[in-house]
Amino acid sequence: MRHLKAHRKLGRTTEHRISMLRNLATSLINSRDDRIVTTLPKAKELRPFVEKAITLSRRAASLEGNTADVGGLHLRRQAAGFFHAGNYGRAAATGRGQTPPPRTAGVAAIRRLFDELGERFKDRPGGYTRIIKMGRRTGDGAELAIIELVDNAREKEAQASARKRTKAAPKKKASGTAADTKEEAGNEE
């Protein structure tokens, strides 16, 4: 029986696996195209990991009233657990008169998650990511996949151009029908 064995181990120790998922989640959130390429098993493990963080940002975007600031901060701190926050050793690395080192990509991911993605997925009840299979990688033959966020700019642009094409294409009469040939013959006489 395989009770309580829900996730893939991916050939790594627990610490390594969680760190790898955090890095993949940070890469996905920070990517300009809202997509990354990875192996299929990693993408399947990353999907629920990222979607839980996006749900937290979505909840923060829908908060209203007096508790919005406090609740939003709490949700930000919960979501920070899904990323490498980058504050460890920041104060110790800065001496007197030195500029502090830049924050890591995890802090930028949390910022983008709560500022942009929370608003984008505010009305969506789930299913924030999509996995597209790419085939096998040359070399080791691993199955590759693209994991991407849905409702991205590229997808909206494609939908808008499809709408323009359907509106711009006027419906033409079918030429060569019997009624059209009779009309043309009658006009010539």
Image: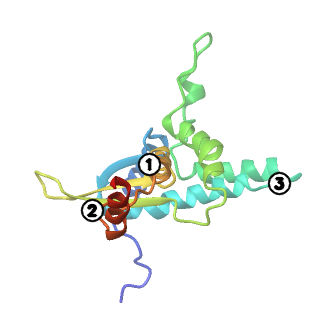
Residue at point 73%, 47% (across, down): 73
Q: Position of residue 64 (x, y in %)?
A: 83, 54
Foreground of the two, 142 or 134: 134
CB atoms of marks 2 and 1 within 8 Å: no
Residue 85 is left or right of residue 186, and the answer is right
Q: Secondary structure at mark 1?
A: helix
| Residue positioned most to the right | 66
Q: Secondary structure at mark 2?
A: loop
Instruction: Inspect the image, locate mark 3, and give the three-letter code of the amino acid beneath it.
Output: Glu
Foreground of the two, 81 or 62: 62
Q: Which residue is mark 1?
A: 158
Instruction: Inspect the image, locate mark 1, and give the three-letter code of the amino acid beneath it.
Output: Ala
Residue 138 is left or right of residue 100, and the answer is left
| Residue positioned most to the front | 189
Q: Position of residue 156 (x, y in %)?
A: 50, 49
Quarter of the image for the N terminus: give it: bottom left
| Residue positioned most to the top | 97
Q: Which mark is residue 64?
A: 3
Q: Secondary structure at mark 3?
A: loop
CA–CA distance in space, label 3 to label 1 = 34 Å
